[in-house]
Amino acid sequence: MGRHSYAKMRVIAHPWDTGRVSIGAFCSIAWDATFMVGGNHCGDCVSTFPFRIKFQLPSADRDGAAASKGDIRVGNDVWIGSGALILSGVEIGDGAIIGANAVVGSDVRPYAVVVGNPAREIRRRFSDAQVAALEEIAWWDWPIEEILAHVDMLGARRVDEFIARYKKAA
């Protein structure tokens, strides 16, 4: 969990799952968000049942596809709403917003707003140029004293002014 992020989320993992969850700085995660790092079943097999795992048979790793599609990575300054479900193998970009009860099974672009089941992007918070500038500024990496000194700008709806003031000289 990154610095100053907060969450009381639920992580679903089985002993045989290999996926992990990493969360960036300054993330706001609802108390009932769920991260499912594994538990996938083989949809292409004759049966979806994990016989080898359930009956402790040899070669349990041969029960269809891997139980996890990989790590879950959450960027910085991400807001994950109430009841959201984040599936294994997903990367959520910096500044994204995940709507309440969204089921996220694929990657989310930086500063995208996604909602629904399956989650789909309904808009971007800022233009491509603004997103690129914000990623370059990376305010979440600043010392906390500097962040707190600029909290009036961080909490304002003046993204162009923020970018003009803090973008590194090219």
Image: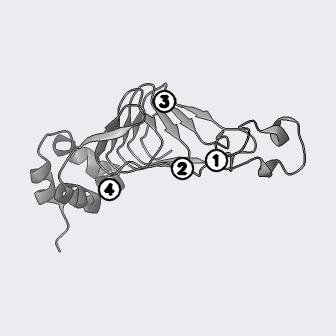
Q: Residue 29: where, in percent of width, then height?
A: 43, 33
Q: Are marks 2 and 3 in contact (CB under 8 Å)?
A: no
Q: Is residue 162 left or right of residue 121?
A: left
Residue type (three-letter) at the residue carrying disc 3: Ala
The earlier-in-sequence mark between 2 and 4 is: 2
Secondary structure under the numbered disc 2 in the rendered image: loop
Q: CA distance from mark 1 to mark 3?
A: 18 Å
Nearer to us in this view, 108 or 146 = 108
Q: Residue at x 46, y 47 (%)?
A: 2
Q: Earlier in the sequence, mark 3 or mark 4?
A: 3
Q: Nearer the viewer, residue 37 or 122?
A: 122
**Which residue corresponds to mark 3?**
33
- The residue beneath circle 4 is 142
Q: Looking at this rendering, what residue extends furthest in the bottom direction?
A: 170
Contact (Cβ within 8 Å) of mark 1 with mark 2 = yes
Tell me, for residue 89, which label it has, or none: 2
Where the C terminus falls, by quadrant? bottom left
User: SS at mark 1?
Assistant: loop
Find numbered disc 3 in the image and state the secondary structure of the residue it sits on: loop
At 51% from the left edge and 44% from the top edge, which residue is drawn? Answer: 1
CA separation in Å, label 1 and label 4: 34 Å
Three-letter amino acid code at the position of disc 1: Ser
- Where does label 1 land, which residue? 68
Of the numbered discs 1 and 4, the one sitting upstream in the chain is: 1
Residue at 23 percent of width and 55 percent of height? 131
How far is the residue under mark 2 from the one under mark 4?
Answer: 29 Å
Give residue 141's position: percent from left, percent from top: 35, 56
Of badges 2 and 4, nearer the viewer stands 2
Q: Amino acid at mark 4?
A: Trp
Q: Closer to the N terminus: mark 2 or mark 3?
A: 3
